[in-house]
Image (spheres, helix red, strand yellow):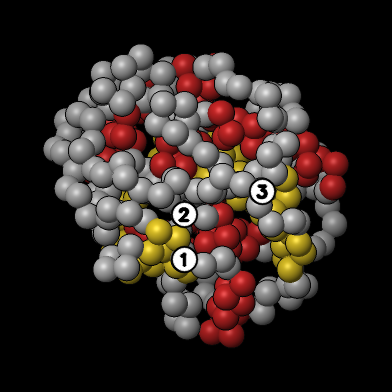
């Protein structure tokens, strides 16, 4: 899926680059079926910050996407104004919905390249900002899924399918919420969420360079096993697609997805694993990083990047 150079310049509307914190701590070795808890740094910035987000705003069609994609940013989904960005095809019709969860250390606006590239293929894409503490990572994520589905149903039409996707820690969230195991049944605080729990079935889950060993079985960060992806696998048969690139500044190597794939296989859970050794993990999300400054930013988009195409292909495959 090649793009002409002019199309890449519109991403400058994204917010300022996001502080990433410690980026280069080595991860622990892991057994395929039951990896030990990661020792990667947890001292990353968690976005969004406290406070009210910017008001909703509609952006003009980006260069190269004219006539195909519409963008509305900062649609609120909680009473505290936590928001999501909505990318939709401009043509009328019924479309599937992909909820794409960013990593814990990156703002939703940085994922515009991936989201618009999916949306132009007749898919609605919502990218929420959310808080996901390690002690209670599901609260706002579950609220986002329900509220986004309701907003889409009201503004555009009932989605034909619902796919949950995520990058880095967002992949852990997507898998936890999508498979219906202990994670998805854990109680969450609904005080600030205007939407009831979602009744829309999840069609598939796409995990992009996930740090699935963040909550290893029996790990100290998850003593109950509630949040570990390894404890979600027997709850349903929702298909899982895992895509992973090469180890980069975030230090999440492909062995992390390979270990989860082995566990999915052992559980008889439907899955596909795609490892792209020539693509850095950050590129899969359309991101770059300045390790010295500790910031994320959109890729330099003067040239095409295969990582974005890989993710688009995997999401479309998940939709069937």
Q: Which residue is mark 2?
A: 106
Whole-number angstrom distance, CA of label 3 to CA of label 1: 19 Å
* Circle 1 residues within 10 Å: few <14, some 14–19, many ≥20: some
The residue that appears at 59% across and 85% down in the rendered structure is: 6
Lateral position of residue 294 relative to residue 55, left or right: left
Element class at badge 2: loop
Instruction: Work out whether 256 lies above or below 117.
Output: above
Q: Nearer the viewer, residue 98 or 72?
A: 72
Element class at badge 3: loop
Q: Position of residue 106 (x, y in %)?
A: 46, 54
Q: Nearer the viewer, residue 201 or 13?
A: 13
> CB of mark 3 within 8 Å of CB of mark 2?
no
Lateral position of residue 176 relative to residue 199, left or right: left
> Sequence order check: which comes first, mark 2 or mark 1?
1
Whole-number angstrom distance, CA of label 3 to CA of label 2: 17 Å
* Circle 2 residues within 10 Å: few <14, some 14–19, many ≥20: many
Q: Nearer the viewer, mark 3 or mark 1?
A: 3
Q: Which residue is mark 1?
A: 17
Identify the mark at residue 52; answer none if there is no mark.
3
Residue 97 in sight here:
no
Q: Position of residue 228 (x, y in %)?
A: 36, 25
> Sequence order check: which comes first, mark 3 or mark 2?
3
Q: Nearer the viewer, residue 49 or 141?
A: 49
Element class at badge 1: loop
> Sequence order check: which comes first, mark 3 or mark 1?
1
Q: Quadrant of residue 185?
A: top right
Residue 56 in sight here:
yes
């Amino acid at each position: 899926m090649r793009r002409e150079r002019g199309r890449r310049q519109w991403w400058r509307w994204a917010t300022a680059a996001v502080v990433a914190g410690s980026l280069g701590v080595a991860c622990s070795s892991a057994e395929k079926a039951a990896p030990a808890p990661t020792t990667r740094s947890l001292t990353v910035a968690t976005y969004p910050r406290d406070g009210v987000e910017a008001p909703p705003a509609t952006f003009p069609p980006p260069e190269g996407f004219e006539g195909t994609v519409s963008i509305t940013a900062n649609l609120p989904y909680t009473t505290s104004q936590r928001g999501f960005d909505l990318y939709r095809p401009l043509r009328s019709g019924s479309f599937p919905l992909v909820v794409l969860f960013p990593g814990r250390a990156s703002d939703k606006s940085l994922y515009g390249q991936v989201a618009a590239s999916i949306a132009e293929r007749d898919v609605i894409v919502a990218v929420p900002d959310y808080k996901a503490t390690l002690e209670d990572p599901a609260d706002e994520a579950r609220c986002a899924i329900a509220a986004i589905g309701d907003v889409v149903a009201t503004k555009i039409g009932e989605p034909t399918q619902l796919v949950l996707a995520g990058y880095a820690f967002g992949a852990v969230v997507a898998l936890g919420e999508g498979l219906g195991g202990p994670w998805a049944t854990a109680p969450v605080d609904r005080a600030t969420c205007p939407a009831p729990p979602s009744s829309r079935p999840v069609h598939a889950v796409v995990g992009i360079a996930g740090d699935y060993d963040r909550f290893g079985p029996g790990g100290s960060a998850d003593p109950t096993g509630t949040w570990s992806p390894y404890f979600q696998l027997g709850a349903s048969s929702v298909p899982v697609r895992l895509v992973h690139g090469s180890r980069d500044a975030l230090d999440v190597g492909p062995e992390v997805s390979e270990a989860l794939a082995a566990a999915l296989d052992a559980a008889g859970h439907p899955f596909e694993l795609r490892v792209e050794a020539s693509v850095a993990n950050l590129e899969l999300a359309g991101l770059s990083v300045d390790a010295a400054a500790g910031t994320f930013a959109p890729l330099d988009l003067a040239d095409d990047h295969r990582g974005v195409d890989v993710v688009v292909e995997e999401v479309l495959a998940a939709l069937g």
